[in-house]
Image (cartoon, rainbow, N blue to C red):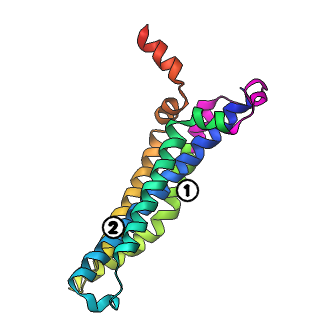
Amino acid sequence: MKKSDIYEIAIKILGLYLVITVIGLFRDILIYASVLVLSNNNTGNTGGVSQTPIFLVTVFNFILVTTVVWFFLFKTKKLTKLICGKEDFMETAKLFTDKQSILEIALILVGLTTIILTVPDFVFRLKNYVYMIQNDLSTVQQDKNFLIISGLKILVGILAVGYSKSISAYLSKDKKSIEKATIE
């Protein structure tokens, strides 16, 4: 394994971690969209401050991070060429395993971390949400959004752990080897 391969693996691991961040940013978009709609309907709640710029910045941030994730996961070779020197493509580094195994381990760790960090808040908010519904209390749109996004994070974590082998196999393939396999 070459030193540049280690850079590729690290970039993909960072991209996988940022997928979870993108989900959180999507939650922010939902929250600010609901605030924007509420502020347009009732301008007294926001003190006359326009919520549109905040919403646009949130959307821009989401698009920016999503683009970075896409580059990290699907244009890793090009990023590695920008980061690495020529000697990194020739110098070999000895690791205990191959690219796919390292990505599989990273997927499992990212998935478990996501589940572990999300479940406590999800359970607490779900308990409060059920309590409010049972007692005919008002529920806020942000509570629903939080539950949806937290559920989505947990689902992504479960998928990352459950399908770590197939995802790591896909992410560790080179375009050249894929093209060879389709030609043959």
Mark 2 Cα shell of 10 Å, populated few (<14), some (14-19), many (≥20) = many
Amino acid tagged 2: Leu
- Depicted 129 relative to depicted 68: above or below: below
Q: Position of residue 124 (x, y in %)?
A: 42, 74
Classify residue 135 as left or right of residue 56.
Answer: left
Q: Identify the image quadrant of residue 58.
A: bottom left
Looking at this view, is 73 or 13 the one in front?
A: 73
Amino acid tagged 1: Thr
Looking at this view, is 145 or 50 the one in front?
A: 50
Q: Residue furthest top?
A: 184
Numbered tag placed on residue 102 in the rendering: none
Q: Is residue 4 visible?
A: yes
Which span is picked out in magenta? 83-106
Numbered tag placed on residue 30 in the rendering: 2
Q: Position of residue 101 (x, y in %)?
A: 61, 33
- How many dots with numbers? 2
Q: Is residue 96 magenta?
A: yes
Kindly state the secondary structure of the residue where label 2 is placed.
helix
The residue pinned by badge 1 equals 113
Kindly state the secondary structure of the residue where label 1 is placed.
helix
Q: Estimate the spatial distance between the alpha carbons at disc 2 and disc 1, rounded to whole Å.
A: 24 Å
